[in-house]
Each structure stands twice: as structure tokens, then as C-alpha cells.
Amino acid sequence: MKVVIFDFDGTIADSFDAFLRITNRLAREFGYEPASPEAIKRYQNLSSREILKQSQIPLYKLPFLLRRLKTELGQDITQLQPIPGIRTALQTLKTQGHSLGIVTSNTQSNVEAFLQHQHMEGLFDFLQSGVTLFGKGRIIQQIIGNNQLDPASVIYVGDETRDIEAAHKINIPVIAVGWGFNSVTALQEANPTCVVQTPDELVEAIARL
């Protein structure tokens, strides 16, 4: 049996449009240009670090921007929907005996509100929230150490290059999902263990690992 750790936004929750709407609304206040459809397509082919550079968001403002994003997202969190098919995939993995968890840079209140509204809270054994943008590897390492897990039995699932980078840092398998923010091309260039295009493929990939 595996311990499967999921990213939240873009992997479980279909929150991309909400994040984009809020980010563009806050653009003038935080000193960056709103993202046009053309810019979004370009960003989806870049790594997370490259996106930060090209967005020209002042780095000292980034923590404050992220805090506002999460706060405003909380106002709409119950309006978000799960990625189509992900609920069934999670239920299948749980039935198979795998332990499921979430590690996310979103807030605990947002994630818990979403899971409760979608009647999905019983699917997860643990939730670690409020992680920094590039701090997921350290948190997953702590989960492994605190629970005396075999790293070979732990799989991380995410939709961005930073998720792949986090897994590489601690040498655990990582499955990149092609339905989130980063394009499949960008994900493949980051060298995940594998890339899947649908939640059904995700279940199959976990069975093979």
C-alpha cells in the first residue's frame, strides 16, 4: 500500500479561474500587469520560478499577495468544483487501502471548507497547509520522518513544476497531472516519474509504482 500525497489547487480543486480572476483584480495594488490570455498560455509552459521572474511581481510583496489571494479565495471556496473524475479516483485509491493526504500552500480553512462542501473530507488521512511556495519538499520530508515511512512507499501528485522539484529534492516518486496549471510539455521537462492526463490514468499509474 502507498501513501499518496496530493497538491490541492489544480490537482484536486479546479481553482485556476478563481485564482486568475483574483490575481488580475489585485494587479494594480501589488504593482504588476494583469495576465492576458496570451501571457497565461506562455506561463503554462514555464517553470514556477520562471513565471515569478517574468510576472515582475516585486518579490518583497509576494508574501502579502499570496496572503490576500488565499483570503479572497476563501470567499468563493464553496463555489469551486473538484477536477472532473478526481473524486472517483480518490475513492478508488482509498478503497484499495492507500493512505491519502494533502500538502498545500493554500490555507487549512479553505481546504477544509472545500472538502466538507464536496463531502470529500473522509477521503484524507492528513492535511498539511500553509506551506510556502517552494517549501513542500521539506514538509513532506517531515511527514515521512515523523511517521517512520519508507520513502519508496510515498508518492507525491501535483500539477506544477514546483511540485516535481519538491519531490526530486527528497527523492520520492512524483506523478504530474496534465489537467492543472502547467502544460504537459513543461511538466515533462521537469522529469517527473510519469505524467497522467486523467484521474483514471492516475489510479493506474499508482498501481504500477
Image (cartoon, grey):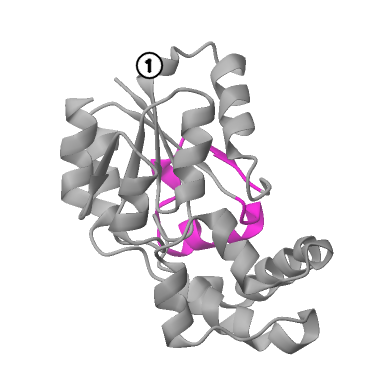
Q: Against 7, is 2 above or below?
A: above
Is residue 126 one of those drawn in magenta? yes
Part of the protein shown in magenta? 105-129
SS for dot 1? helix
Q: Is residue 33 visible?
A: yes
Q: Does residue 48 appear left or right of residue 204 in this picture?
A: right
Is 116 or 13 nearer to us in this picture?
Answer: 13
Measured as percent of width and height from the top left, residue 201 is found at: 17, 46
Measured as percent of width and height from the top left, residue 176 is found at: 34, 46
Task: Determine crowd level at label 1: few under 14, some 14-19, many 20+ residues with C-alpha closer than 10 A.
Answer: few
Q: Does residue 161 appear left or right of residue 127 in this picture?
A: left
Q: Residue type at mark 1?
A: Ala
Q: Against 104, is 111 above or below?
A: below
**Residue at position x 67%, y 76% in the image:** 72
Measured as percent of width and height from the top left, residue 146 is found at: 62, 17
Q: Does residue 146 appear left or right of residue 31 in this picture?
A: left
**Residue at position x 53%, y 78% in the image:** 20
**Residue at position x 69%, y 84% in the image:** 27
Q: Quadrant of the N terminus?
A: top left
Is residue 57 one of those drawn in magenta? no
Is 197 or 43 nearer to us in this picture?
Answer: 43
Occupied quadrant, residue 112: bottom right
Occupied quadrant, residue 191: top left
Q: Quadrant of the C terminus?
A: top left
Q: Does residue 53 appear left or right of residue 95 in this picture?
A: right
Q: Against 159, is 135 above or below?
A: above
Question: Which residue position holds label 1?
Answer: 152
